[in-house]
């Protein structure tokens, strides 16, 4: 499930990028995100997935975070 969420996030960012082929794939962080999407149980991949999920959670708007905390969904 986590790999699917990371894949959806990657595809959304690829779709919204200005130059899809040249600059988007040349960025170092995008390649790390691709590696994090691979569903292999290998320790470095787990760490990359965990870091990417933490980054995605920090990008959630504050009002949604407040909703999650108020309803105790966290």
Image: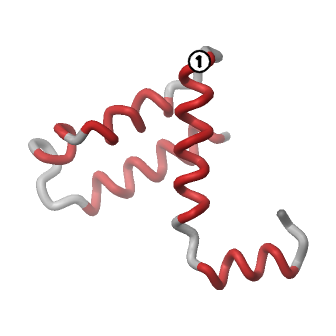
Q: Residue at x 51, y 25 (%)?
A: 38
Q: Quadrant of the C terminus?
A: bottom right
Above or below for 9 versus 1: below
Identify the residue at the far bottom of this view: 63
- Along the horizontal axis of the image, is 33 left or right of 62? left
Q: Residue at x 90, y 71 (%)?
A: 72
The chosen color scheme is: secondary structure
Residue 54, how many percent across, how many down?
60, 51
Residue 26, how many percent across, how many down?
17, 38
**Badge 1 is on which residue?**
40
Q: Residue at x 57, y 70 (%)?
A: 60
Residue 50, how many percent across, how many down?
62, 39
Tell which of 2 and 51 is nearer to you: 51
SS type, badge 1: loop
Above or below for 11 versus 42: below
- Along the horizontal axis of the image, is 41 left or right of 17? right
Mark 1, Cα crowd under 10 Å, few <14 / some 14-19 / many 20+, is: few
Count the numbered circles shown.
1
Above or below for 11 versus 74: above
Q: Quadrant of residue 32?
A: top left
Q: Residue at x 40, y 48 (%)?
A: 10
């Amino acid at each position: 499930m986590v790999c699917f969420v990371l894949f959806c996030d990657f595809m959304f960012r690829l779709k919204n990028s200005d130059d899809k082929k040249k600059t988007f794939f040349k960025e170092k962080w995008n390649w790390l995100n691709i590696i994090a999407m691979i569903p292999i149980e290998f320790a470095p991949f787990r760490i990359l997935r965990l870091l990417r999920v933490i980054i995605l959670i920090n990008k959630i708007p504050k009002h949604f975070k407040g909703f999650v905390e108020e309803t105790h969904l966290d």
